[in-house]
Image: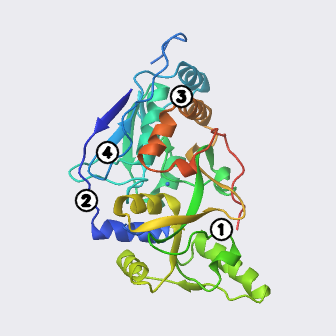
Amino acid sequence: MALSKKQGIAIGVGVVAVAAIVGGIVWGVNQNAPAEAAAPEATEESANVTTDEIQWVRLDEPVAEAVEALEASGFEPVEPGKLTVAHSAYVPPLGYIPEGETNPAGTEPNIGALIADALGLEYNPVVVAWADWPLGIQSGKYDLITSNVTVTEERKELYDFASYREDLLGFYVKSDSDIEKIEEAADISGLKIAVGSGTNQEQVLLAWNEELEAAGEEPAELQYFDDNAATVLALQSGRIDATFGPNATSAWAARETGDTKLVGLVPGGWPLTANIAAATAKGNGLIEPVAIALNYLIENGQYDEVLKIWDLESERVDESLVNPPGLPKS
């Protein structure tokens, strides 16, 4: 069964600025149950939420297979009976702190809560700065992180992963733009595109520009802005043609404002596929039970409902994999 909780959201200028820094361009803004127990069901509530109504999808009962795997693993939580899950909180839909609240909401907290439910543990969220989670996970301060973490081969040396989303980058244009498709280098020729400096998406555009120049075609003009407000103004005034950044936050902003539209998706690790995953300390035994929990959620509908609520169906995966191939070391 799903639990709904209405919470007001205040996205301050400071929060949006942080989101723009860590994620590139963001505008408009990683108990035992008997085997025969009835399977927890997904809610049928409407997914048409806005930022003043937040829905939580939860399980009524643990998932027996996941609980059994956890007991067999020998893993001991930081706090007995609880799953302490780290989250960074910046902006919807991934994670943010609603007005008047201390705990985070969004896709990543809801995934963390569902994993805890499936394992028969109490969900214990902890908001952490992005730079602090690696040491916190390694040292055992936190059991798990669900906060839009991309799997990389370098990270796999220290952490175990269970994947649950595809990392996608999105091209967005004004809702009334004549641009309908940006999927390859030829589609950006001559366009002015806002992108975050030093990001994966910048590397994609630079590589595409190399293709264009090699073919004798006009490259795209990359535009860099210091803050989110300037990017929004530039797009709406026509000084730039498109923005290119993490799809999750951009998709939410497009739905909330109606000012922009999606015209193309690119894997976050282009040309490779990148996976978003839950992460825990290497070899501690937790990741296999987590993957069992995630695959249950995928198979039984709760996972799809979370994605639908937050408009992230495009980032869906069919299966949670333990330590899938990660992006190569740079």
Q: Earlier in the sequence, mark 3 or mark 4?
A: 4
Which of the 4 image quarters holds residue 200? bottom right
The picture places residue 318, in percent across and down from the top left corner, at 64, 39
Earlier-in-chain disc, 3 versus 1: 1
Q: Is residue 188 above or below residue 83?
A: below
Question: Label 4 belongs to which residue?
Answer: 54
**Badge 4 element:** strand
Residue tagged 3 = 300
Between marks 1 and 4 in the image, the one whose residue lies nearer the viewer:
1
Q: Nearer the viewer, residue 199 or 235?
A: 235
Identify which amino acid the numbered label 2 is placed on.
Ala
First reached walking from the N terminus: tag 1 or tag 4: 4
C-alpha span from label 3 to label 2: 33 Å
* Marking on residue 128: none
Q: Amino acid at mark 3?
A: Asn
* Structural distance between the alpha carbons of marks 3 and 1: 33 Å
- Determine the image quadrant of residue 35: top right
Q: Please name the residue that numbered disc 1 is placed on.
A: 183
Query: Which residue occupies 51% across, 80% down?
Result: 241
Q: Which residue is mark 2?
A: 10
Question: Split into 4 quadrants, where in the image is the N terminus?
Answer: top left
| Residue 5 percent location from the top left of the image | 28, 39
Q: Nearer the viewer, mark 2 or mark 4?
A: 4
Give the side of residue 160 with respect to residue 50, left or right. Answer: right
Answer with mark 3 or mark 2, whichever residue precedes in sequence.
Answer: 2
